[in-house]
Image (cartoon, rainbow, N blue to C red):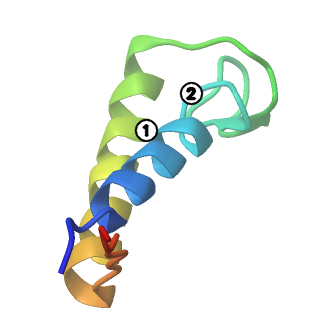
Amino acid sequence: MGPDWGPVVVAVALFILLSPGLLFQIPARTRVIEFGNMYTSGISILVHAVLYFCIYTILIVAVGIHIHANNF
């Protein structure tokens, strides 16, 4: 059995998707949520970090995503 690539793939995908300002930003400058504004603030970084941790923990621990690479 090879190494488990599941946590790595999930971490990279979530990092790309939850980067503040890329797809959405919570909280935004003028509203609660803005989409694709490419701006960020300290509080939005904190909110996205908490979201990242929660979603990552749910996917890895509760759902149990595993991708095993077999080396021949």
- At horizontal 47% and vertical 39% (from top left) the residue drawn is 15
| Left or right position of 33 against 47 | right
- At horizontal 64% and vertical 26% (from top left) the residue drawn is 28
* Residue 16: quadrant of the picture: top right
Q: Amino acid at mark 2?
A: Pro
Q: As displayed, is residue 1 above or below residue 3?
A: below
> Nearest the camera: 32 or 11?
11
Q: As displayed, is residue 60 above or below residue 45?
A: below
| Left or right position of 46 against 26 | left
Q: What residue is shown with label 1?
A: 48
> Nearest the camera: 64 or 48?
64
CB-based contact (under 8 Å), mark 2 and mark 1 = yes
Q: What residue is shown with label 2?
A: 20
- At horizontal 39% and vertical 13% (from top left) the residue drawn is 42
Q: What secondary structure is marked by label 1?
A: helix
Looking at the image, tell me whether mark 2 or mark 1 is earlier in sequence order: 2
Marks 2 and 1, how far apart in space? 6 Å
